[in-house]
Structure formats: C-alpha cells, structure tokens
Amino acid sequence: MTEPGGPAARAFRVEAATLYVVATPIGNLDDVTLRALHVLRDVDVIAAEDTRHTRVLLEHHGIAARGRLVAYHDHVEAERAVELVRRLAAGESVALVSDAGTPLIADPGYRLTRAAAEAGVRVVPIPGACSPVALLSCAGLPTDRFTFAGFLPAKSAARRRAIAELAARSETIVLLESPHRLAATLSDLHELMGEREAVLGRELTKRFEELRRGTLGTLAARYAVGGDAAPRGEIVLAIAGRGDGTRTAEDGEAALDDLLRVGLDAGEPVAALARSVAERLGIPRRVAYQRALALKGSA
C-alpha cells in the first residue's frame, strides 16, 4: 500500500477553511482510502465521535494525533458544532469522523455539516466504508432502490408502528439493530411483514464476520429469546420489499390496516390514531378514522 506521505500524496492537498466528512473502516482497519489517510494526516482538527477509537486508527496507519483530536458526539454536538464552524471560518481545516463507517449515517454530524454550509464553508465528502451498503453489495436482494431506516425505536409500540409503515414499501429495506434488541425486532418484523427473504450481517469486515440468509421467520426463530445466545457486535439487516415491486391499491389498504391495528393494540384513542396514520400515509383523515372504527368494532 502507498504510504500517506508517499508519491500519491502529492496528488491531493488539504485546503484551508474546509470541512472534510471522512469515512473510516467499519471493522478492518485497512479498509480506508488513501485520500482519507491524507486528510487525517494533514488537517488542523479531527472531530471524532470517540477520540480513543480514532486514535487506534491513526496509530495503525502511522499518523500522529499531535493534539488535533477533539470529541464530537451526541452529548456535545450542539456546542462543538458552533466552535468548529468558528475555527473553519478562521481558516482551519477539519476532518469529521465517526466510530465506524460514513459520518451522519446513523451517526452524529448533521448539525456540523449544516452549520458549515450555512456559514459558506466548503464541505467535502471523503467516501468509503458504510455498513448498510456493504451488506447490500453481497445480500443478493434488489439494489436499484432501497430504503435505509437506521435503528428502529427501542420501545415496542413505536417500533411496531415503524415496521407497519415500512411493510408497505416495495423496495429493499435496510435496518441497523443492537444485539440485545435483535430477538424482539425480528419477531415484530416477522409478525408484521410476513415470511420475506432477509439477510443478516454481523461484525462485517471483522474477524468473526457472519452473514445469515433466510426468511424473517427462520431468522426470528434462530435468535428468539431462549434460542441462540444473543449475538455480539454490529448488526445490519436487509429485507426484501413487498410483493413484486409494484404498489397496488391493496398494498395501500394493507398498510393502513397494519398501522391502525398496531395503534389499536397499544390502546391509542381512535381519533388521535387516525390523525397520525392519515398524515403518515397521505390520505384523508376521515378514511383512516372510519377504517379504525371498523377494525375496532370487529376486534
């Protein structure tokens, strides 16, 4: 591999007053681009989700931190974004990195990139690893269109509402999940989406990388509470879209019923439920209200 300070470095120079959004490895520390290494070596400031984690990457590639690392995570994002934009406006260069993968994809960074753009600061992407894209590349599911839904809500009722909304989509769906919630999420996905093809990726690019293919039912059974021990590490899930890719009137009716049933099962008032579902699906409120009353009466 060409070293960051080798001949290739002359083809790229870090510019002043520029924010670089830098993708870093999702596991294997060698999965990083030469351009990313050049940026991390030369910028004035590296804003990292976890400075300890980023320091390991820098040391692995022989890049000195030199006091350039500052924390940029959820708890300090608002005030740190203001500070970094001020430094950018003064002519410093800044690299934004997350713990793994591409910043802002289920990671902090939105406030900083938005504030920088509004301040007239140049924002430059340095693309690279991204776990949802890594799984899609080998899942064997359609990738001409897909929906990335990030992490589903932790609470059961909110999670089920989100799944019911996703169930009507015809494109491939990609989710992230934590190990301790995987069993509950797979159970809800199977119940609300049915027996669809799915691929689960765990610890992608790492030593214990695992890819499991099957259906939502087989995956739910495998990771059910009391079944296999709870898995460890980062988890990405790709799920086939509904039907053959065409959205029909029946799909819309099914999505309406799924969302209403989840809300009714959770004890939500009919009027409030109908209003929220109508807004989500873009349908008249009276249609959702009348359907909710019919479902409640038949229960």
Image (cartoon, rainbow, N blue to C red):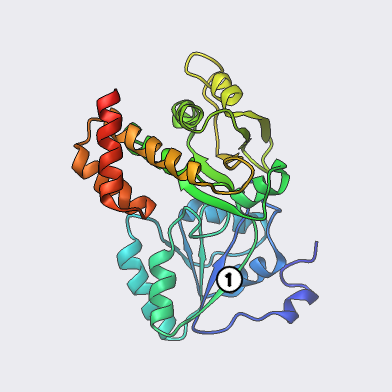
Which corner quadrant holds the C terminus? top left
Residue at horizontal 46 percent and vertical 86 percent from the top: 91
Q: Is residue 263 above or below residue 19?
A: above
Q: Nearer the viewer, residue 80 or 55?
A: 80
The residue labelled by disc 1 is 125
User: Residue 268 at what x, y percent from top left?
Assistant: 22, 35
**Dot 1: what SS?**
strand
Q: Is residue 30 above or below residue 38?
A: above
Residue at horizontal 68 percent and vertical 34 percent from the top: 211
User: Residue 9 at what x, y percent from top left?
Assistant: 73, 76
Decide: few, some or many residues near mark 1? Use Cα within 10 Å; few <14, some 14-19, many ≥20.
some
Residue 103 in sight in this render = yes
Q: Is residue 165 above or below residue 92?
A: above
Residue at horizontal 29 percent and vertical 24 percent from the top: 298
User: Residue 115 at what x, y percent from top left?
Assistant: 38, 75
Task: Determine whether, in the image, residue 96 is placed left or right of residue 133.
Answer: left
Q: Amino acid at mark 1?
A: Pro
Q: What is the total number of numbered labels drawn onto the structure image?
A: 1
Residue 28 in sight in this render = no
Residue at horizontal 24 percent and vertical 34 percent from the top: 293
Which corner quadrant holds the N terminus? bottom right
Q: Nearer the viewer, residue 85 or 158?
A: 158
User: Residue 16 at what x, y percent from top left?
Assistant: 53, 84
Task: Determine whether, in the image, residue 103 is placed left or right of residue 269.
Answer: right
